[in-house]
Image: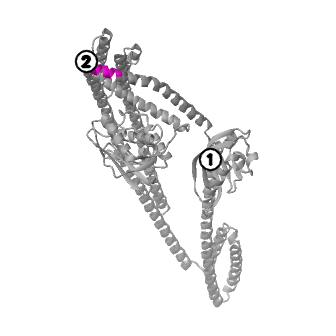
């Protein structure tokens, strides 16, 4: 019986161990596949980056060549010089990176041939310019065709690399989809084996108990009275040995059993001596022994129940102890994080009294923990900003959180510093607010960097605007001269140059407005004006330079708004320009106005590529541009929507966008209506 019991246990544990090892092996193989996939993704990204660098080098060379052709100044050829060698070096690196891909090797060879052709065309045009020969439209078209062929070849190579990356990802996904199912199946089999082994062991134990009971019954029937008494004494002795392992809570029961055992032995001795003289006394003794055995059985049952209760209490106590240890570990980790943080982390009461002060706070403000704990937080706040603490406490007492609140605080030596505050209420288990947690980050240097950057942008924009104005006037004079001479090529080239200078002027004005906005010098001069007329005027200006789109606008009665006409015109111009840039040729751009109470809502809708949801949140951030396959060739610096949002907000309005992928976007903004005269 014992051998079978041990065998069942070993078989159950063996199967469980085998399944655990199998799961571990499959997990290891999955990790290896994931590492290989990451390497493949990194490799493909490097290939695509090199391809973009090749295209960028050729664009720089082409830009330098155009500058030389238009101005005749040799310094414009600096990007062109060495461009071919740099492009060949990049294609050589690409050839090495794609050595394991025959198709990509073919693409690289094609790119090198196209590079040679493009550089030959660039050199021919430069040679003509140096010799004073006229450059025809056919020459320019040949250069454009070669550049388009290069773009197509680079795009083809990128598409091939993307297909390879997709295939690798698909293979990895198929493998990782199988593994969870296999692990779940293995876990179920392990559970089934464990349950089966447990049932086998329980059955063996029960059978063993049954056989032991039968054996004891036969011994009681066939043994003589003395043997029965001896067996009773042995059972009592065994019970006493087992009872010695019971804890202090069952000590009283053990003493009672010991007393009962001694009494039983005494009675047995007395009855044994009297057995020889009287059979009736022997019968009475047997009855008393039976009753005593029943009492012992009842006592054993009570002791077993007590043992089970003690074991259950011990398990609960062990669980509580483990939870306390885990809570202590979490508290220690949190305390270590708070102390090692570079940010100032401060705890305070709802009355503004500091209760905790980390090392980051000491480095930021100069006060030690001993100097600040128990003190008012007003010790850090300039007197002219005491009102901020009252407003902050009122929000936190309502359970509201304050994120990235920028203000000024004082160090120990009185030096003011600019900080960004994130403040949260601290709640107890009942959900009541019992304190405040404050994280302060020193952003003084960041603000100085932003100011230096804005000063540089403003200075550079002013310096660029003066020569650009002169260049624009010169181009316009040349256009008038060329129209009199009838030179088609020069007229086309000057028209393009005039378009580019206007575009450059728009970018410079955008940077100047950003600089003025952040330095507080962007003035908003609000006067009543008719909105329909301004919208029609902006649309007509767009039609003069854009003939690829259809503009639709239907005025809805007289709309007089109280705003800065010039600034609102720049907002409309920016939204119309974006609608044209981000929608295919031949599409419709629709402008609408609706009036709600004292506000008018203006919308500009296009039928373009749409905007991804994750880009919508940052659409109006400074210098933010949407990055995608469709927008990488569209120029811009990401200041137009930022300026538009600031202008509208300074008018007391609101600006937002709605978009659906591949179906177009709609930009809305509101303005206050002018009060009736």
Say the numbered circle drawn on residue 136. 2
Q: Position of residue 279 (x, y in %)?
A: 63, 89
* Secondary structure category for the residue under label 2: loop
Left-right relation of 569 to 588 = right
Taken as a whole, is the magenta stretch helix, strand or loop? helix
Left-right relation of 55 to 386 = left
Direction left: furthest residue? 138
Q: Is residue 479 magenta?
A: yes
Q: Position of residue 357 (x, y in %)?
A: 69, 47
Does residue 567 show up? Answer: yes
The quarter holding residue 578 reads top left
Of tags 2 and 1, the one toward the viewer is 2
Left-right relation of 32 to 429 = left
Closer to the camera in the image, 651 or 307 = 651
Q: Which residues are magenta?
A: 477-484
Q: Position of residue 616 (x, y in %)?
A: 42, 46
Q: Indicate the colouring scheme.
A: one colour
Closer to the camera in the image, 507 or 339 = 507
For the residues bearing labels 2 and 1, Cβ distance under 8 angstroms: no
| Residue at the image point whose x is 30% and y is 24% from the top | 108
Closer to the camera in the image, 615 or 394 = 394
- In this rendering, the answer to whether 454 lies above or below 64 is below
The quarter holding residue 158 reads top left
- In this rendering, the answer to whether 93 lies above or below 401 is above
- In this rendering, the answer to whether 99 lies above or below 641 is above
């Amino acid at each position: 019986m014992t051998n079978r019991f041990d065998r069942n246990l070993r078989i159950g544990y063996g199967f469980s161990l085998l399944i655990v090892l199998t799961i571990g092996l499959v997990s290891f193989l999955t990790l290896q596949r994931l590492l290989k996939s990451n390497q493949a993704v990194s490799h493909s990204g490097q290939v695509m980056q090199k391809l973009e660098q090749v295209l960028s080098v050729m664009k720089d060379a082409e830009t330098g060549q155009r500058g030389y052709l238009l101005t005749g100044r040799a310094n414009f050829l600096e990007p062109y010089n060495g461009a071919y060698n740099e492009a060949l070096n990049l294609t050589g690196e690409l050839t090495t990176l794609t050595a394991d891909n025959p198709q990509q090797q073919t693409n690289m060879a094609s790119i090198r041939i196209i590079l040679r052709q493009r550089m030959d065309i660039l050199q021919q045009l430069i040679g003509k310019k140096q010799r004073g020969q006229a450059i025809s439209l056919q020459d320019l078209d040949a250069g454009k065709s070669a550049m388009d062929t290069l773009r197509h070849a680079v795009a083809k190579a990128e598409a091939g690399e993307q297909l390879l990356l997709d295939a690798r990802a698909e293979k990895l996904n198929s493998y990782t989809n199988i593994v969870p199912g296999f692990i779940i199946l293995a876990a179920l089999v392990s559970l089934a084996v464990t349950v089966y082994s447990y049932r086998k062991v329980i059955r063996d134990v029960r059978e063993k108990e049954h056989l032991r009971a039968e054996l004891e019954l036969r011994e009681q029937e066939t043994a003589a009275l003395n043997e029965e008494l001896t067996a009773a004494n042995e059972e009592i002795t065994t019970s006493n040995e087992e009872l010695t392992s019971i804890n202090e809570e069952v000590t009283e029961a053990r003493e009672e059993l010991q007393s009962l055992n001694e009494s039983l032995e005494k009675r047995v001795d007395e009855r044994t001596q009297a057995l020889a003289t009287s059979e009736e006394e022997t019968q009475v003794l047997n009855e008393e022994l039976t009753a005593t055995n029943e009492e012992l059985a009842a006592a054993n049952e009570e002791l077993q129940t007590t043992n089970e209760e003690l074991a259950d209490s011990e398990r609960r106590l062990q669980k509580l102890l483990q939870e306390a240890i885990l809570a202590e570990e979490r508290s220690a980790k949190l305390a270590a994080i708070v102390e090692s943080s570079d940010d100032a982390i401060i705890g305070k009461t709802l009355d503004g009294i500091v209760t905790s002060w980390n090392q980051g706070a000491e480095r930021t403000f100069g006060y030690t923990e001993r100097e600040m704990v128990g003190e008012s937080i007003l010790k850090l706040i300039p007197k002219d900003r005491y009102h901020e603490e009252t407003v902050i406490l009122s929000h936190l007492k309502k359970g509201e959180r304050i994120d990235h609140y920028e203000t000024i605080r004082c160090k120990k030596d009185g030096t003011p510093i600019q900080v960004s505050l994130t403040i949260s209420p601290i709640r107890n288990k009942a959900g009541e607010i019992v304190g405040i947690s404050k994280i302060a980050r020193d952003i003084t240097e960041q603000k100085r960097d932003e100011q230096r950057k804005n000063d540089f942008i403003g200075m550079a924009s002013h310096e660029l605007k003066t020569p650009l104005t002169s260049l624009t006037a010169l181009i316009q004079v040349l256009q008038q001269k060329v129209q009199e001479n009838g030179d088609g090529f020069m007229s086309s080239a000057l028209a393009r140059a005039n378009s580019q200078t206007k575009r450059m002027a728009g970018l410079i004005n955008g940077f100047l407005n950003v600089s003025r906005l952040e330095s507080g010098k962007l003035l908003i001069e609000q006067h009543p004006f008719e909105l329909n007329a301004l919208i029609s005027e902006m649309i007509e200006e767009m039609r003069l330079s854009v003939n690829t789109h259809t503009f639709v606008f239907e005025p809805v009665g007289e709309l007089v708004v109280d705003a800065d006409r010039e600034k609102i015109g720049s907002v409309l111009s920016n939204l119309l320009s974006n609608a044209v840039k981000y929608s295919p040729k031949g599409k419709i751009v629709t402008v609408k106005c609706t009036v709600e109470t004292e506000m008018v809502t203006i919308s500009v809708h296009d039928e373009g590529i749409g905007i991804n949801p994750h880009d919508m949140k940052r659409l109006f951030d400074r210098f933010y541009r949407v990055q995608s396959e469709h927008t990488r060739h569209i120029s811009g610096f990401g200041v137009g929507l930022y300026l538009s949002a600031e202008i509208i907000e300074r008018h007391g309005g609101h600006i937002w966008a709605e978009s659906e992928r591949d179906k177009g976007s709609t930009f809305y903004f509101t303005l206050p209506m002018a009060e009736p005269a």
